Image: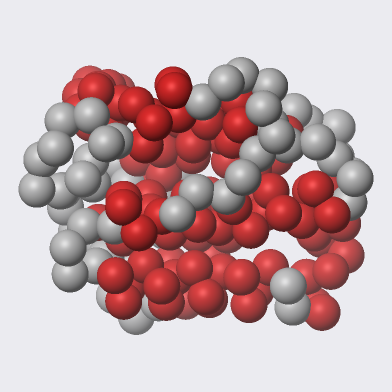
Amino acid sequence: MALMAKAKKQAQGEQFTAPDIAQFVPQGMEDAVERIVAAGAKMMYSPQMRDEVMKQVQGDQPIATKLAHNVAGLLMVLDQKAQGGMPVQAIFPAAIGLMGEAAGVLQAAGQTVTQEDFNEAARMVFVLLAKKMGASDEQIMEQAGQFAGGEDGDDNGAMEGEPMQAGVAA
């Protein structure tokens, strides 16, 4: 079942529980997703990032915006560091995994993260990353429709194309 279809079944306002991203990882992308999530978590929890993480946690944006924008930014930094970029099919599942980590940070800081917040952040990060990869609004809507509709295609809603090119303006 697609992420958005599952999310619709969740009660709104319910306390967030990190999803098992394995069901969203395209076949053959397991290692890539795991490496991206591990690299992102390592960066997020590094002592050098502590002040920046706290600044973002204490920001006054809505929870969904904090999650989506910060995880998208983290993925852009990781993509810049990766030789040849990250595989496109691994990016969205990795983003969901990293948003689970980031939601845990927010919760540890005393902020409430609901399932609704997480679901909205998932939609937002999908659009942000797709725009960074140069997708048109039409392409984004088509992919989002497939993903939200629960169509079981070969790509699990992954966007087609080359590795993400960091630094492309949204």
Q: Establish if 2 lies above or below 33.
A: above
Q: Residue at x 37, y 36 (%)?
A: 3
Residue 160 percent across, percent down from the top left? 16, 48
Residue 15 percent across, percent down from the top left? 70, 34
Q: Is residue 9 left or right of residue 164?
A: right
Report the number of numbered marks. Answer: 0
Q: Residue at x 49, y 68 (%)?
A: 37
Q: Establish if 1 lies above or below 161.
A: above
Q: Is residue 96 left or right of residue 162?
A: right
Residue 155 appears in the figure:
yes
Check the picture and name the quadrant holding the N terminus: top left
Q: Establish if 29 lies above or below 101.
A: below
Q: Residue at x 63, y 77 (%)?
A: 42
Quarter of image, res 82: bottom left
Quarter of image, res 66: top right
Q: Can you name the residue that lies furthest to the left here?
A: 154
Q: Residue at x 15, y 48 (%)?
A: 155
Residue 40 percent across, percent down from the top left? 56, 69
Check the picture and name the quadrant holding the C terminus: top left
Closer to us: 82 or 15: 15
Closer to us: 19 or 143: 19
Residue 127 appears in the figure:
no
Which color scheme did the rendering employ for the protein? Answer: secondary structure
Q: Establish if 130 lies above or below 168.
A: above
Q: Is residue 47 left or right of residue 113?
A: right
Residue 141 percent across, percent down from the top left? 27, 22
